[in-house]
Image: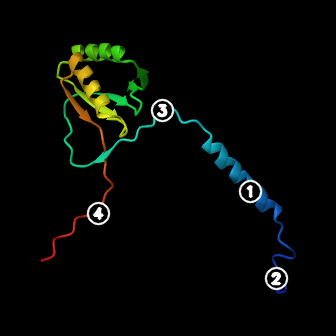
């Protein structure tokens, strides 16, 4: 088969309409994606490293910056939380540990109030959940 050597792939002006339609469809998807509701509570945990953990069974409670409490992915009032924690602590054979997922803007008073509530319910120990610090790479040896 012999191909002509004088053939050109584009024999005219490039049409901008297909490019514009693809651009507008992309803009539409980006705008629709930003309007989608993501369920849940937005918490910004503080970052830290080398904090102790626990090997005991634990119960998690979240606390947002407005002082609202969340237990088992549901908003809950203090009295109801106390009752549920007492029930869980009563059923457990081992002492439980409270894991507090507190927003970094939550006040110290809110955190103390939650740990005291857990202590009244029979959970003697509480730890604050944190995010690990970003990995900085391997440590460099000291220069003599």
Q: Residues within 10 Å of mark 2 (few under 14, many from 20)?
A: few
Mark 4 → mark 3, Cα distance in angstroms: 33 Å
- Give whichever of discs 4 and 1 has the lower sequence position: 1
Q: Can you tell which of label 2 and label 4 is closer to the viewer?
A: 4
Apparent side of residue 93 relative to residue 134 in the rendered image (left or right): left
Please state the horizontal and vertical placement of residue 39, each as a whole percent of the image.
52, 32
- Please report the residue visible at 66 percent of the width from the left and 43 percent of the height from the top: 32
Please state the horizontal and vertical placement of residue 129, each as a whole percent of the image.
29, 38
Q: Answer whether labels 4 and 1 touch (C-beta < 8 Å).
A: no
Up/down of 111 relative to 13, above or below = above
Residue highlighted by disc 4:
137
- Please report the residue visible at 86 percent of the width from the left and 76 percent of the height from the top: 11
Up/down of 48 relative to 136, above or below = above
Residue highlighted by disc 1:
22
Q: Nearer the viewer, residue 33 or 45?
A: 45
Residue 40 marker: 3
């Amino acid at each position: 088969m012999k191909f002509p050597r004088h053939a050109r792939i584009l024999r005219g002006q490039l049409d901008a309409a297909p490019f514009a339609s693809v651009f507008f469809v992309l803009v539409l998807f980006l705008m629709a994606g930003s309007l989608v509701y993501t369920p849940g509570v937005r918490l910004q945990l503080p970052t830290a490293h080398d904090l102790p953990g626990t090997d005991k069974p634990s119960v998690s409670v979240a606390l947002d910056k407005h002082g609202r409490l969340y237990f088992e992915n549901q908003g809950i009032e203090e009295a109801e939380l106390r009752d549920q924690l007492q029930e869980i602590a009563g059923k457990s054979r081992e002492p439980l540990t409270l894991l507090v997922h507190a927003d970094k803007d939550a006040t110290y008073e809110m955190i103390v109030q939650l740990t005291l509530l857990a202590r009244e319910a029979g959970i003697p120990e509480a730890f604050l959940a944190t995010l690990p610090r970003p990995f900085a790479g391997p440590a460099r040896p000291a220069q003599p």
